[in-house]
Image: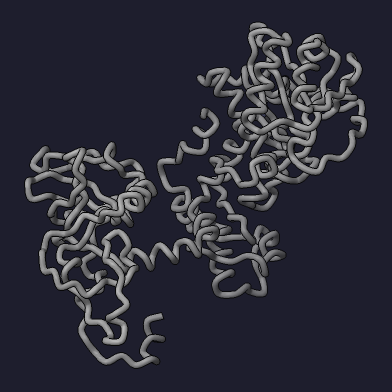
């Protein structure tokens, strides 16, 4: 769980906004901006040379300069990103690989090399140059074909760590153990298997904890081939050996990094970055090979704005179309889900007060409660009994109306009862509500007249957006539409 903290902890100020601002202020980038937009002149400053040679791949997206998929970072923000990049003291090669997938500026690689060369913590724990190239194990085709297992320690007040690394993906697992014996080794090995399944082959050295009869029995029962490499010859167990070395090194570095983080935090931070940085031998990110998906990391967060836009373009389209079908403006008369009576599901009349986010609204009920509701939990009053005029040919083929599924055709109902009906299909209703993370627990009841009317219980993620009343589609003047007119709106 700890590891996800790094992904979750977002920056207070929108980095996208900062980049936009600093790009305008940056003497070089502001010129580059103009040249990219309006075309390059015959002569320009020498500092623009590195950009000029890439000019065919540089473009502007949302007022931010991009080189391919990488954001071009203004001078003022470069140190911030370098610090972020080096926060786990990973080596220059790994940092470069990670940086390359997100951002760029001229001499980025040199700057990265400098930061690790000048880092006092890194300098004092620099390891010896590699002496032996590891002997070749047979090639593995997929994750869990072969894992390597070894102990690191004792470090930091006699702490021992069992290290397991998957040969294919390079995904590492690190378990702190009380004692490096067979009992604890098997305990952690079982934990590993419960998470990732049983490996086909495990490679260890001849340490007593691995050579015991219990360990080989465990392997036999589970159909695991157990290979051992001679002790005192760590290069034979090269993969795990290297990892143990780099792991120990980084752990020492982190322990000497005088910040307030606990050993566990430091450890998780290191593993987190290790798992999410392209590995030098595979050029792939261990987590994507092991888990089959890209894991969200803090750097991702920095650039979330546009990576999200790119990745979710089609998804966004669906969402927008969906929400356009259901639009609310201030003072709209609506019915909202009422969860105040736990055993009765029902709807209650309310007035839309404010839009909190794309799909989130504050609604005031007739008895004065302020409820926060997702768009799926709101129905416009009257939506149920105002049947649209249907084509006579289609009238026979109508389905049952539900507010939960606004896309389904609305039937021509003769029942003029203004009380909205509670959909009886509870299973699909629940699954809809389950998707939106605002079930009962998040229900907010706030006194309206309280302290200047400021409502303090809004969630961290939602942005306060006042409803733009001009933006609703209902008030358009009626006029004949011709096809070519559409072009004017684009
Ligand atoms: Zn360092």
Point 81% across, 9% down: residue: 208
Point 47% across, 56% down: residue: 20
| 86 is higher (above) or lower (below) than 428 | above
The residue nearer to you, when weighing 481 against 407, is 407
Residue 242 can be seen in this image: no
Q: Residue 2: percent from the left, percent from the top? A: 52, 28
Image check: 271 left or right of 316? right
Q: Residue 83: percent from the left, percent from the top? A: 58, 36
Point 71% across, 30% down: residue: 198
Q: Residue furthest front?
A: 396
Q: Quadrant of residue 467?
A: bottom left
Q: Quarter holding the C terminus?
A: bottom left
Q: Quadrant of residue 13?
A: top left
The residue nearer to you, when weighing 268 against 364, is 364
Image check: 412 left or right of 367? right
Q: Residue 391: percent from the left, percent from the top? A: 28, 85
């Amino acid at each position: 769980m700890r590891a996800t903290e790094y992904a979750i902890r977002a920056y207070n100020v929108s980095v996208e906004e900062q980049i936009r601002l600093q790009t305008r202020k940056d003497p070089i980038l502001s010129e580059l901006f103009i040249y990219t937009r309006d075309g390059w002149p015959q002569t320009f400053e020498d500092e623009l040379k590195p950009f000029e040679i890439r000019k065919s791949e540089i473009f502007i997206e949302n007022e931010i300069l991009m080189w391919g998929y990488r954001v071009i970072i203004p001078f003022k923000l470069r140190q911030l990103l370098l610090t972020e990049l080096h926060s786990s003291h990973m080596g220059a090669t790994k940092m470069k690989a990670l940086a390359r997938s997100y951002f760029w500026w001229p001499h980025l690689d040199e700057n990265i090399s400098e930061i690790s060369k000048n880092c006092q913590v890194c300098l004092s724990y620099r390891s010896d140059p590699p002496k032996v190239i590891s002997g070749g194990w047979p090639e593995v085709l997929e994750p869990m074909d072969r894992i390597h297992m070894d102990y690191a320690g004792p470090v930091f007040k006699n702490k021992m760590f069992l290290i397991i690394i998957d040969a294919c993906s390079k995904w590492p697992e690190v378990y702190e153990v009380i004692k490096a014996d067979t009992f604890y080794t098997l305990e952690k090995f079982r934990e590993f298997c419960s998470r990732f399944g049983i490996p086909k082959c495990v490679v260890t050295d001849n340490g007593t904890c691995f050579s015991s009869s219990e360990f080989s029995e465990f392997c036999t029962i589970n159909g695991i081939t157990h290979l051992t490499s001679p002790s005192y010859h760590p290069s034979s167990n090269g993969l795990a050996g290297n990892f143990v070395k780099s792991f120990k090194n980084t752990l020492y570095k982190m322990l000497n990094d005088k910040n307030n983080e606990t050993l566990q935090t430091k450890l998780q931070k290191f593993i987190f970055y290790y798992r999410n940085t392209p590995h030098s031998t595979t050029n792939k990110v261990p987590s994507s090979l092991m888990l089959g998906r890209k894991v969200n990391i803090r750097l991702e967060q920095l650039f979330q704005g546009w990576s999200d836009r790119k990745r979710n373009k089609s998804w966004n389209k669906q969402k927008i179309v969906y929400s356009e079908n259901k639009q609310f403006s201030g003072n709209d008369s609506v019915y909202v889900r009422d969860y105040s009576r736990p055993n009765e599901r029902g709807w209650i009349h309310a007035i839309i007060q404010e839009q909190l986010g794309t799909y989130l609204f504050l609604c005031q009920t007739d008895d004065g409660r302020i409820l926060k509701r997702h768009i799926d939990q709101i129905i416009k009053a009257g939506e149920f009994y105002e049947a649209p005029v249907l084509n006579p040919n289609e009238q026979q083929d109508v389905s049952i109306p539900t507010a939960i599924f606004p896309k389904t055709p609305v039937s021509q109902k003769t029942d003029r009862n203004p009380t909205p009906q509670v959909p009886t299909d509870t299973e699909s209703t629940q699954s809809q509500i389950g998707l939106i993370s605002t079930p009962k627990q998040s229900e907010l009841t706030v006194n309206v007249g309280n302290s200047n009317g400021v409502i303090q219980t809004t969630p961290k993620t939602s942005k306060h957006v006042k409803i733009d009343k001009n933006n609703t589609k209902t008030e358009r003047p009626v006029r004949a539409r011709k096809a070519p007119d559409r072009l004017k709106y684009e």
